[in-house]
Image (tube, rainbow, N blue to C red):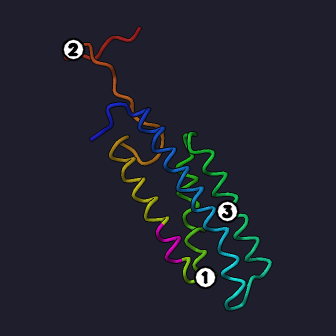
Amino acid sequence: MTAPDPVRAARALGGAAAGILVLAGLATLFVPRGIAQSGDGLTGGRLTYLLVLAVLLILAAGVQRRPQGVVVGTALQVPLLLTGLFSSVMWLVAGAFVLIWLYLLQVRKELLGTPFGAPRVPEPDDGDGDAAPTP
């Protein structure tokens, strides 16, 4: 099943992807507080990793309208999931974001015909069964 208007569906899915990435970035900013009170504490390397990841997630939300925006967002899901190494609760939180992202990719594949890249726009039909001539 593909969307009747793939371009409009791609914009809507891009907005959803941007929203997920912003929320994941904000959730990542809450992690240092939890790490500081447990285990080895908050080291400079951990803080740098989390702050850079949060900034990258928020910046990736801004490029979701570009053709490679979904690829960038998908690549950032791996370091997001690895935040579970710092705090065990992040396995659950980051895992939830990764599952939501995978669901978004599945919906994108069903509506646009591809989980990555530009939507496939069907050729206009003039009603006689043949493709319409291009001007």
Specify the quadrant that holds the N terminus: top left
Q: Nearer the viewer, residue 73 or 29?
A: 29
Report the residue marked by disc 2. 127
Q: Residue at x 26, y 13 (%)?
A: 126
Name the image quarter holding residue 130. Answer: top left
Q: Is residue 92 inside the magenta stretch? A: yes
Residue assigned mark 1: 87
**Mark 1 / mark 3, whichever is N-terminal:** 3
Circle 3 residue = 54
Vertical relation: 109 (above or below) 49? above
Tell me the element at label 1. loop
Q: Residue furthest left?
A: 128
Q: If you read the primary sequence from the N terminus, does the residue marked by circle 1 or circle 2 appear first?
A: 1
Q: How many marks?
A: 3
Question: Residue 100: percent from the left, percent from the top?
Answer: 44, 61
Q: Is residue 22 above or below residue 9?
A: below
Where does the image place residue 99, in percent across and percent down from the top left? 43, 65
Determine contact: label 2, label 3, CB under 8 Å.
no
What is the span of residues highlighted in magenta in the rendered image? Answer: 91-96
Q: Nearer the viewer, mark 1 or mark 2?
A: 1
- Give me the C-alpha separation between circle 2 and circle 3: 51 Å
Are the two marked residues, 1 and 2, in contact with CB atoms closer than 8 angstroms? Answer: no
Q: Is residue 31 left or right of residue 47?
A: left
Within-10-Å neighbours for mark 1: few <14, some 14–19, many 20+ = some
Helix, strand or loop: magenta stretch: helix
